[in-house]
Amino acid sequence: MSKKKRRKLYIPGLRFHNLQELRHSASLATKVFIQRDYSDGTICKFLTKFPAELDSRIERSLFEETVKTLNCYYAEAEKIGSQSYLEGCLACATAYIIFLCMETRYEKILKKISMYIQEQNEKIYAPRGLLLTDPIERGMRVIEISIFEDSGSTSSSSTGSSPSSATAQ
Amino acid sequence: MSAVMITRKVTRKWEKLPGKNTFCCDGRVMMARQKGVFYLTLFLIVGTCSLFFAFECPYLAVHLSPAIPVFAVLLFVFVVAMLLRTSFSDPGVLPRALPEEANFIEMEIEAANGNVMAGQRPPPRIKNVQINNQIVKLKYCYTCKIFRPPRASHCSICDNCVDRFDHHCPWVGNCVGKRNYRYFYLFTLSLSLLTIYIFAFNIVHVVLREYRNIFEHVVSLTPHCTVLEVLVCFFTLWSVVGLTGFHTYLISLNQTTNEDIKGSWSGKNRVQNPYSHKNFIKNCCEVLCGPTYPSVLDRRGVMLEDSTRPTPSDASAASTYKSTNPVSQTTKSSAPLIPNEHTPEEAKPSIGAGTQKSTSSPKEEKPPSPTSPNAVAPAVIKESAH
């Protein structure tokens, strides 16, 4: 998104121009999981701690911005305010039958999140050989980031990073 | 039924879900395995109300007011809708960790524990998080291979971790958790009102009839059904009204039944409930008027035919993981796990466990009154041998 920082961290020989190329020509090396942040209670929020495995792949600021935006979306979805009251009361008055035909506010925001993640993948992550998975596909427990290597290199390079995985505490 | 039209069979994700749930209507309905008590609940409600509508309502509508049966019908519809919503919806089941995630967590645990001496029991798998200045312990679930989020618990009857687990209710045939707690509460509340309503008008009916009979010197025997209704209502009243009162108390404190039974926030050792807003109205609003959480189990999603896991190279990457960490492997195998009858084998993926699910799919039970109008599944040929 930030146009001024065009310096991309490329591994030599590793160039992916779009998501399709990523899926077809790269092999999965490892996955990193961004855990939930429970400091504010049970609301859906993810830790913004930058994992060590991504150190050489993406700028810290880009990663943090992605996670913070996702956290904002989830906070908006789970906000208890006038809109959620109205929705709840209206639904209760119709014995919740209205939910069979109407999309809830949360579902609308989830669609926005899914589009945002796709956009981020296309613009930022795929060119760096990374792929974000929508948290809803992992039970809203983690943000899974797949790290791809060029098909030519072996996957043994991934093991070098595993012992250094810091505990997310 | 026409074999010509079948191109390929579509497998939906609910068919491969681990756990002991039964699914109906091609994944739209999700319940526990034991449904006998649920049918009893439905029978009692529908039966008693039918008797009321058949025998009492005509008399009351004529002699008192036609609004009485109308209100009873509305209340009855609401009660049944809430019951079916509670019973058929996903309570907030947390899906099990996929192998990569499980491995990642294992590695984190081992990094945190350091080297465990051979023969020594490794420390319990607990994560401490701070919520509102209170330390909350997150336990590791050996079945689901995840650290349970706060307030989640594993239901042994359904064999799932459920978010904001309240209790497993046999009367509704399902767990009560984050997604269906408000429906459960509204069910008990509306059922209390309905029971009181029917009970009251039964008494009124009996009194009116006997008064008329005395006036006209007619001998009458109070109809048997009225007596039956009074009995059912009387016994239901004590249990349901009590339960409603109990849950109102829990909601006002923003606690779950599970936490109340375990005494998690009972106040000893200066432990306070970190989720409570310390305000009755706010707590009620959060539980009853909060957002409607979506189900994270994509029950009706279509499973990809080639494989559910992305690529074969993924499996090879995972195996290189394990082979390069022989120390962690031996530590894991020698460390005695906390015994759990549901602890699956190491290599058994979540898909493999789904074979037990596929046997229950042909047994498609007809739901009493389906909440989804188009209960007939879309044109997916399901006549396939499992």
Image (tube, rainbow, N blue to C red):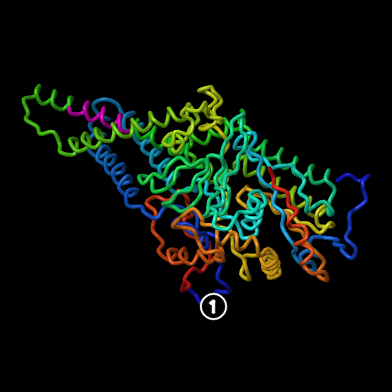
- Give the percent coordinates (x, y) of residue B335: 55, 57
The one nearer the camera, B11 or B221, is B11
Vertical order, A86 against B361 (above or below): above
Highlighted range, magenta: B194-206
Q: Is residue B29 visible?
A: no
Q: Chain of mark 1?
A: B
Give the main secondary structure, helix, strand or loop, of the magenta stretch.
Answer: helix
Going by the image, does B30 lie left or right of B230?
Answer: right
Near mark 1 (Cα within 10 A), the count class, few <14, some 14-19 or many ≥20, is: few
The one nearer the camera, B243 or A20, is B243
Vertical order, B256 against B331 (above or below): above
- Write the residue at 73% across / 57% down: A162
Residue, disc 1: B4
Of the residues shown, which amino acid type is indicated by label 1? Answer: Val
Going by the image, does B76 lie left or right of A81?
Answer: left
Name the quadrant containing residue B238.
Answer: top left
- Write the residue at 35% across / 48% down: B38
Name the quadrant containing residue A15.
Answer: bottom right
- Give the percent coordinates (x, y) of residue B378: 53, 61
- Give the percent coordinates (x, y) of residue B70: 35, 33
